[in-house]
Image (spheres, coloured by chain):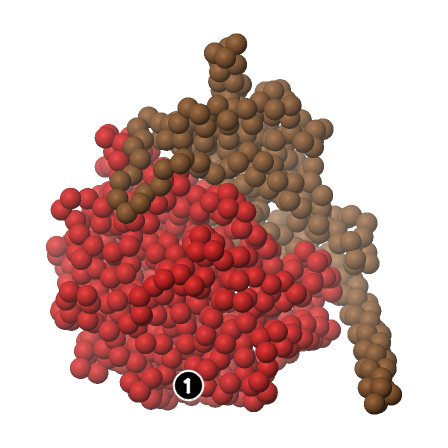
C-alpha cells in the first residue's frame, strides 16, 4: 500500500497547484493521474487569466463582474476569494517563468473579455492554458513531487457512517494502466480531487476524451452532494465539425460575428446592444442558435466569426494558435476568410459541493478546479475565470489539507438546517435501485482508516475482475454514444420539459444496458477498454444529475434556459440545486445562495450587456 | 485455540486457490472467445473491404500476453470516410465499431496534449492533426519507432520523460514575490525569441525521428535540448543560470551529438525550429567557452 500525507487525484492546473501548495506547507504529497500531467486538458485553455493587476482596476470590480456573470448563483465568499487572490497567483506564475505576452514596457499584457468591466484578462498568446500547465508541471518536477501517471483512480476509500457528514476519506484505489495492477493509496491528511471536466457526456464538446467527470461521480457515490449540475456552459465559438475551441480572445481583440445575411446580429438583432460580441457567453450562444433557428444561419448550422480586419501582424502576435486550429481542424484560413463557429459544450459550472477551501462534507476529502463547485461561477462562468480558479483554489485546498493556517470557511457544506427538500416528476425510476454497493452499506463504523482502505481495495479488485470475466453483453462505446446523443439532443442550450424527460428515459435505458456491459479486451496490459467501461458508468451518473437539475429548476437563469419559464425567479430560485446519492437513487434538495460578501451584498439586478 | 485458528486459515487458502483456478478458467475461456471474435472481425473486415467508400488502414498490433498478438502483426480495417476525418478519428471508429481492444493514446483531439504521435505512412505525425485525405492507401499506422512498444500503438515514454527532466526543465530564479504584485520585466523581443520553443507538447515525434537518438540512448535529444533553449534564452533567469544551462547541454551526450539532419524539425507538429535551436546553443556554448578561455 502506498501511503502519503496528501493524495492529489488529477494533474491538470488545479491538481498541480494543490500539490505544490501542500508540499510547501510541509506535506508528503503524491499525485495519481490517469494521464501524464502535460496531457491534461488545462493545456487546451486559450484565452487567459482574469486578474485585477492594473491601476484603475480592483478585485472588487472583478468580483462584481463575476457575481453578475453568474446571474447571482455564485456564493460571494468563493467569488471574492477568486478575485482577491488571482493577481497574486498570476504574478506567482510569472515568477515561475510562464511565458506571458508582453507590453512594450515589459509588463504582462491584458485584453478585454466578455462580461468584464476592465480589460483584465492576462494571457500568453491564444495558448494560455498550455503555458500555465507546463509552468506548473515544471515546478512539480523541481520539487520532486511523486507522480503516478497513467494510474486511473477507480474509487475513494471512505468510511461507512450513515450520515455523509460523519464520514472520512482515507485514500483512493487506483488501476495502473500499463500493468493492470489495482493498488491502494492511503492519505493521512487528505485526498484532493482535481479531475477536471465532464464534457464527454455530450457529443459536441471542446473537452478532451479524458474529461469524463470521474471525480464528481466518485464523490457523489461516496455521499458528497453535487451542486448546480444543470449549469452547463456552451461556448459560442467552437468549430462545427469537431467542437475544437476558438478562443473568446478573438472577440476580445475585436473579432465580429455575422449571420448568413451579413448582419452583425449581436447588435442588429438586439441581443446585446452595449457589448455586442463581448456579452457573456450564455447570451452569445443563445443568440447564435436563435439566428440559426430563425433561418439566418449558414448552412442552417453555424455563424461566421471574422477577424481578418485585425490584420496579420496583430493576429500573429496575439492569436496565432487560432490560425493553426482553424486550418488543421476546419480547413479555413483565418487571415483570408471568416471562420465557421457554433456553440459547443465547454464547461461545467456545477460539480462537487465544496466550501471556499475546497473542503467537502466528508472529512479529508477536497475538490478543486472544474470538478468542484464552491460556487465561483454560479449559473454562468465568465471567460478567463477558469484558469485563476485552478490556481487560487488549488493553492487553498493544498494548504488546508496539509494543515496550513486558514480562516474559518463561510460557505456551509453538506445538509444543514437550511436544506430544503426537492422533488422532480421523473418518467422513470432514477439511479440504480437494484445496486447495493453504496459506500454506506451499514458495515462496521469502528473501522480504522487502514481497514477502510483495505476494504475499498478489495471491492475495486472484485469490480475489475467482474468486468474482465464477463464475456458477452453490451460494449461501453454503444452505451456512451447513446448517452451523448440524448444529452446533445435534449439537454442542450434550449431546454423543454418533455425533452428533459425523454433524456431521463434514455439514461435509464442506458443504465439497464450497462448491467450487461462487458470488456472485450482480455489483456491486463494497457487495457483502455476496461478504463473506458468504468468511465462510462461515471458518465451515466453525470448525465442523470445534469438532467435532474435541469428538470427541477423551473426558471431561466444564466446558462439554464427553460421554454416554459422565461424569467429569472429570484423569489423562489436564489438557491443551489443539490443532488445526493441516497440508497442507489438521486435525492434532490436545495440550499440558499450566499450573496453577502466582505464589504457588500450582491443584490440581484437585471442582467444586460 | 491454535487449531481453531489454523483451520479457517487453511480453508481460506484452499478457497483462494480454487477461486484463482476458477478465475483462470474463466479468463482462459474469455481469451478463447476473444479469438473467436477475432475471426469474426476478420470476416467482417473482408466484407467491408469490398466497399469503395472506405479508407483502408493497416494497423500495427502487439500485446505481450494475448495469444495471436504476441508476434507483432498488421490488422486491416476499412473505415467509412467522412470529409475532415483524421487518422485519430479513423482509429476511434475502428476501435468502437470493429475491435475494442485496439489501443492507442489520445485525449484532446486538437494537437495540444501530445498523446497521439504515431508513425503514419513512414513519418512521425499526430493522429489528430493528420487528414486521411492527405494520405495514400493503405494507410499504414505504427507506433513511434525507436521506442519500446507496450501494446499496439502505445510506446513506453519513460526514456523521453527522463531526458526532458535531465535538463532541469524549470525556472530557477532566487527572488519570489512576497506580497508585492510586481512581475519581472521581459522585452517583447525576448518573449518572441523563446515563443516557439515554449510550444513543445512533449509528443516525442522529434526524438523518434532522430538517427542520433536511435544510436545513442544517452543523447538528450531534440525536445530536451529545445527545453534547455527555452530557459537559456529567457532573459529573466539571468547570466549565471544561462552559463549553467549551457554546461548541461554541452555535456558529452548534448548538443554536439546533433548532426543537423533536420529530421526533428521536419516532423515537429508545432513547427518548432528544433535544429536551429540546437545550433544556436552550440554557438552560445562556444562563445561562452571563449570568454572563459
Q: State whether residue A335 is above or below residue A293.
A: above
Secondary structure beneath disc 1?
strand
Quick one: A361 or B214, which is closer to the camera?
A361
Q: Residues within 10 Å of mark 1 (few under 14, many from 20)?
A: many
**From where the camera sits, is residue B286 visible?**
yes
Which image quarter: residue A66? bottom left
Give the chain coloured brown: B
> How far across and down, in percent of the image, does residue A108 sit?
28, 38
> How far across and down, in percent of the image, does residue B15 sit?
83, 81
Residue linked to disc 1: A587
Label total for image: 1
Give the chain coloured red: A
Residue at figure coordinates x 23%, y 37% from the top left = A309
**From where the camera sits, is residue A255 visible?**
no
Q: Is residue A44 left or right of residue A34?
A: left
Quarter of the image with the C terminus of chain A is: bottom left
Residue at figure coordinates x 52%, y 57% from the top left = A29
Q: Is residue A94 left or right of residue A175?
A: left
Residue at figure coordinates x 15%, y 69% from the top left = A601
Quick one: A485 or B191, which is closer to the camera?
B191
Residue at figure coordinates x 36%, y 87% from the top left = A424
Which image quarter: residue A292? bottom left
Q: State whether residue B213 is above or below residue A238.
A: above
> How far across and down, in percent of the image, does residue B116 sit?
57, 47
Quarter of the image with the N terminus of chain A is: bottom right
Q: State whether residue A599 is above or below residue B64.
A: below
Q: In the rendered structure, the residue with mark 1 lies on which chain? A: A
Which image quarter: residue A414? bottom left
Quick one: A557 or A421, which is closer to the camera?
A421
> How far across and down, in percent of the image, does residue A133 sit?
44, 47
Amino acid at each position: 500500500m502506498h501511503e502519503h500525507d496528501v493524495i492529489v487525484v488529477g494533474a491538470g492546473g488545479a491538481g498541480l497547484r494543490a500539490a505544490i501548495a501542500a508540499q510547501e506547507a510541509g506535506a508528503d504529497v503524491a499525485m495519481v493521474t490517469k494521464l501524464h500531467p502535460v496531457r491534461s486538458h488545462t493545456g487546451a485553455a486559450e484565452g487567459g487569466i482574469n486578474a485585477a493587476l492594473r491601476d484603475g482596476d480592483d478585485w472588487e470590480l472583478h468580483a462584481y463582474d463575476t457575481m453578475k456573470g453568474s446571474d447571482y448563483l455564485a456564493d460571494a465568499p468563493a467569488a471574492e476569494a477568486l478575485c482577491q487572490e488571482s493577481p497574486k497567483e498570476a504574478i506567482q506564475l510569472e515568477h515561475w517563468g510562464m511565458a506571458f505576452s508582453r507590453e512594450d514596457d515589459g509588463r504582462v499584457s491584458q485584453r478585454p473579455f466578455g462580461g468584464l468591466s476592465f480589460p483584465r484578462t492576462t494571457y500568453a498568446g491564444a495558448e494560455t492554458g498550455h503555458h500555465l500547465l507546463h509552468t506548473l508541471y515544471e515546478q512539480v518536477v523541481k520539487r520532486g513531487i511523486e507522480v503516478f501517471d497513467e494510474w486511473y483512480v477507480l474509487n475513494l476509500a471512505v468510511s461507512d457512517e450513515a450520515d455523509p457528514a460523519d464520514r472520512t476519506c482515507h485514500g483512493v484505489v487506483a488501476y495502473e494502466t500499463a500493468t493492470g495492477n489495482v493498488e491502494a493509496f492511503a492519505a493521512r491528511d487528505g485526498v484532493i480531487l482535481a479531475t477536471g471536466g465532464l464534457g464527454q457526456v455530450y457529443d459536441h464538446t471542446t473537452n478532451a476524451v479524458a474529461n469524463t467527470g470521474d471525480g464528481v461521480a466518485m464523490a457523489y457515490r461516496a455521499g458528497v452532494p453535487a451542486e448546480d449540475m444543470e449549469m452547463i456552459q456552451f461556448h459560442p465559438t467552437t468549430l462545427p465539425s469537431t467542437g475544437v475551441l476558438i478562443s473568446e480572445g478573438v472577440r476580445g481583440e475585436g473579432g465580429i460575428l455575422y449571420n448568413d445575411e451579413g448582419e452583425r446580429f449581436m447588435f442588429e438583432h438586439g441581443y446585446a446592444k452595449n457589448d455586442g460580441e463581448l456579452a457573456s457567453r450564455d447570451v452569445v450562444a443563445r443568440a447564435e442558435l436563435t439566428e440559426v433557428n430563425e433561418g439566418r444561419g449558414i448552412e442552417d448550422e453555424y455563424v461566421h466569426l471574422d477577424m481578418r480586419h485585425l490584420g496579420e501582424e496583430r493576429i500573429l502576435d496575439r492569436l496565432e494558435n487560432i490560425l493553426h486550429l482553424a486550418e488543421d481542424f476546419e480547413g479555413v484560413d483565418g487571415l483570408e476568410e471568416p471562420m465557421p463557429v457554433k456553440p459547443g459544450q465547454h464547461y461545467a459550472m456545477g460539480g462537487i459541493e465544496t466550501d471556499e477551501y475546497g473542503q467537502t462534507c466528508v472529512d479529508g476529502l477536497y475538490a478543486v478546479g472544474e470538478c468542484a463547485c464552491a460556487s465561483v461561477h454560479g449559473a454562468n462562468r465568465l471567460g478567463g475565470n477558469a484558469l485563476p480558479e485552478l490556481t487560487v483554489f488549488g493553492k487553498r485546498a493544498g494548504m488546508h489539507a496539509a494543515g496550513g493556517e486558514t480562516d474559518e470557511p463561510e460557505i456551509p457544506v453538506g445538509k444543514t438546517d437550511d436544506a430544503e427538500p426537492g422533488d422532480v416528476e421523473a418518467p422513470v425510476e432514477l439511479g440504480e435501485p437494484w445496486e447495493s454497493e453504496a459506500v454506506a452499506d451499514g458495515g462496521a463504523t469502528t473501522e480504522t482508516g487502514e481497514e477502510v482502505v483495505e476494504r475499498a481495495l478489495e471491492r475495486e479488485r472484485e469490480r475489475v475482475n467482474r468486468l474482465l470475466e464477463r464475456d458477452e453483453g453490451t460494449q461501453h462505446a454503444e452505451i456512451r454514444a447513446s448517452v451523448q446523443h440524448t444529452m446533445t439532443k435534449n439537454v442542450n442550450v434550449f431546454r423543454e420539459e418533455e425533452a428533459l424527460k425523454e433524456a431521463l428515459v434514455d439514461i435509464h435505458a442506458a443504465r439497464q444496458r450497462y448491467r450487461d456491459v462487458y470488456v472485450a479486451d482480455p489483456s491486463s496490459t494497457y487495457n483502455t477498454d476496461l478504463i473506458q467501461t468504468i468511465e462510462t458508468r461515471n458518465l451515466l451518473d453525470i448525465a442523470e444529475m445534469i438532467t435532474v437539475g435541469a428538470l427541477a429548476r423551473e426558471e431561466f437563469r444564466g446558462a439554464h434556459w427553460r421554454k416554459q419559464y422565461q424569467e429569472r425567479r429570484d423569489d423562489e430560485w436564489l438557491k443551489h440545486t443539490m443532488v445526493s446519492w441516497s440508497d442507489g437513487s438521486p435525492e434532490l434538495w436545495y440550499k440558499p445562495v450566499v450573496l453577502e460578501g466582505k464589504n457588500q451584498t450582491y443584490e440581484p439586478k437585471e442582467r444586460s450587456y | 485455540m491454535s487449531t481453531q485458528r489454523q483451520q479457517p486459515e487453511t480453508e481460506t487458502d484452499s478457497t483462494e486457490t480454487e477461486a484463482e483456478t476458477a478465475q483462470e478458467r474463466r479468463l482462459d475461456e474469455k481469451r478463447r472467445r476473444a479469438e473467436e471474435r477475432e475471426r469474426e472481425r476478420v470476416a467482417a473486415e473482408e466484407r467491408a473491404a469490398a466497399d469503395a467508400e472506405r479508407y483502408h488502414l493497416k494497423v500495427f498490433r502487439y500485446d505481450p500476453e494475448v495469444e495471436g498478438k504476441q508476434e507483432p502483426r498488421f490488422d486491416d480495417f476499412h473505415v467509412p470516410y467522412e470529409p475532415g476525418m483524421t487518422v485519430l478519428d479513423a482509429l476511434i471508429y475502428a476501435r468502437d465499431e470493429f475491435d475494442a481492444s485496439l489501443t492507442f493514446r489520445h485525449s484532446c483531439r486538437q494537437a495540444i496534449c501530445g498523446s497521439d504521435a504515431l508513425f503514419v505512412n513512414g513519418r512521425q505525425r499526430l493522429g489528430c492533426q493528420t487528414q486521411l485525405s492527405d494520405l495514400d492507401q493503405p494507410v499504414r499506422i505504427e507506433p513511434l519507432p525507436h521506442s519500446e512498444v507496450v501494446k499496439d500503438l502505445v510506446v513506453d515514454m519513460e526514456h523521453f520523460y527522463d531526458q526532458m527532466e535531465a535538463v532541469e526543465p524549470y525556472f530557477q530564479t532566487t527572488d519570489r514575490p512576497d506580497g508585492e504584485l510586481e512581475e519581472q520585466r521581459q522585452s517583447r523581443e525576448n518573449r518572441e525569441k523563446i515563443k516557439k520553443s515554449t510550444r513543445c507538447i512533449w509528443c516525442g515525434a522529434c526524438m523518434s525521428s532522430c538517427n542520433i537518438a536511435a544510436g545513442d540512448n544517452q543523447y538528450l535529444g531534440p525536445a530536451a535540448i529545445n527545453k534547455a533553449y527555452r530557459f537559456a534564452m529567457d532573459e529573466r533567469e539571468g547570466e549565471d543560470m544561462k552559463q549553467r544551462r549551457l554546461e548541461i547541454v554541452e555535456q558529452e551526450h548534448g548538443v554536439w551529438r546533433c548532426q543537423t539532419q533536420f529530421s526533428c524539425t521536419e516532423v515537429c507538429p508545432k513547427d518548432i525550429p528544433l535544429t536551429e535551436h540546437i545550433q544556436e546553443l552550440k554557438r552560445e556554448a562556444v562563445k561562452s567557452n571563449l570568454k572563459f578561455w
